[in-house]
Amino acid sequence: MAGYDEATRARLGADAATIIARYPQARSALLPMLHLVQAEDGYVSPAGIAFCADVLDLATAEVSAVATFYTQYKRHPNGEYTVGICTNTLCAVMGGDAIWDEVSAHLGIGHDETTEDRVVTLERIECNAACDYAPVVMVNWEFFDNQTPASTVGTVERLRAGQPVAPTRGADTVCSFRQMSRVLAGFPDGRADEGVGAGPATVRGTVLARERGWTAPEFDVPADDAPGTAGGVPDAGRPQSSAERPPTTPADTSAATQTSTQKES
Ligand code: FES
């Protein structure tokens, strides 16, 4: 299996050490490590597989098994921009299917295929938790809300022309596939707080509840489930009564749902 040259291996080795140090066991670092090699090669290459296996003390078959399980890991060279069109139920009925049909025909490519100029890789994607802005398109995991076939064709053509493209929420511009992959590997680009995360549609329920004085119904937490008991779950996995729950404001909601390119499907 082809490997990296000495200089590349040394550079990636330093990054790998940073990633691995975040986990109690080295093998737990595999997911960000796969993003790291994807940032290097534009996909999870044979050299990247071998590198991950070596530094994490895994078999190459184990690394490949993980890389082939998650759709964010590409097993062939990806375009500079992944254009993901949500064709999950809500987006589909709101126009996602029509967007897909038009953009796919316009580019002459299908799912997980890349334009000849290597700029756009097209994907059908599942729900991105942005249904309040359906139909949604993602470019390298940045949100393009309330899209139409024409608006999405316009976006891919601006990308192919090398023009700057801004998402409707989140970062000010979309970055390249390799830059995005490096962020997902755990090396922030400092842009996570650019733009708005949760827009008005996202926080509409919270705003209405505050205006009208609505609160969630009270409920009793069974004694066995109380924190600190044998069956209790003392962390965020346990439902909280409204008395325990911290107040939620539109600002809180916005911060909690702030989006960046650090997003895993
Ligand atoms: S169905 Fe498309 S974002 Fe939820």
Image (cartoon, rainbow, N blue to C red):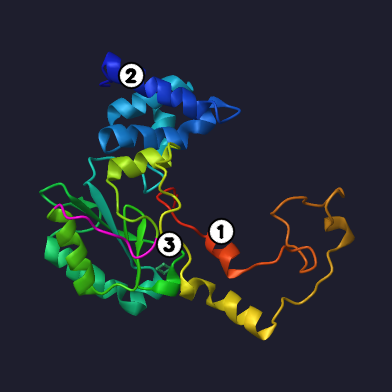
Image coordinates for residue 100, horizontal then vertical, percent: 24, 68
| 179 sits left or right of 231 in the view | left
Other residues around mark 3 within 10 Å, as few (<14) / some (14–19) / many (≥20) = many
Whether residue 116 sits left or right of residue 88 in the image: it is left
Front residue (pair 84, 212): 212
232 vs 78, left or right, is right
Q: Which residues are magenta?
A: 162-169
Q: Dividing the image into 4 quarters, which one contains the N terminus?
A: top left
- In the visual, does 244 lie left or right of 262? right
Q: Amino acid at mark 1?
A: Ala
Label ID, residue 151: none
Between tags 1 and 2, which lies in front? Answer: 1
Name the spot of residue 235 as percent of width and height, x first. 73, 50
Mark whose residue sits in front, 3 or 1: 1
Crowding around mark 2 (Cα neighbors within 10 Å: few <14, some 14 to 19, many 20+) is: some
Residue lying at the far top of the rendered structure: 6
Residue occupying the point 54% across, 26% down: 21
Q: Residue 124's image quarter?
A: bottom left
| Residue assigned mark 1 | 256
| Residue 100 visible somewhere in the drawing | yes
Q: Which residue is mark 2?
A: 9
Q: Residue at x 12, y 60 (%)?
A: 108
CA–CA distance between discs 3 and 1?
15 Å
Q: Are marks 3 and 1 in contact (CB under 8 Å)?
A: no
The residue where tag 3 is placed is 128
Tell whether circle 3 marks a residue whose Cβ is less than 8 angstroms from ligand 1: yes
Q: Main secondary structure of the magenta part?
A: loop
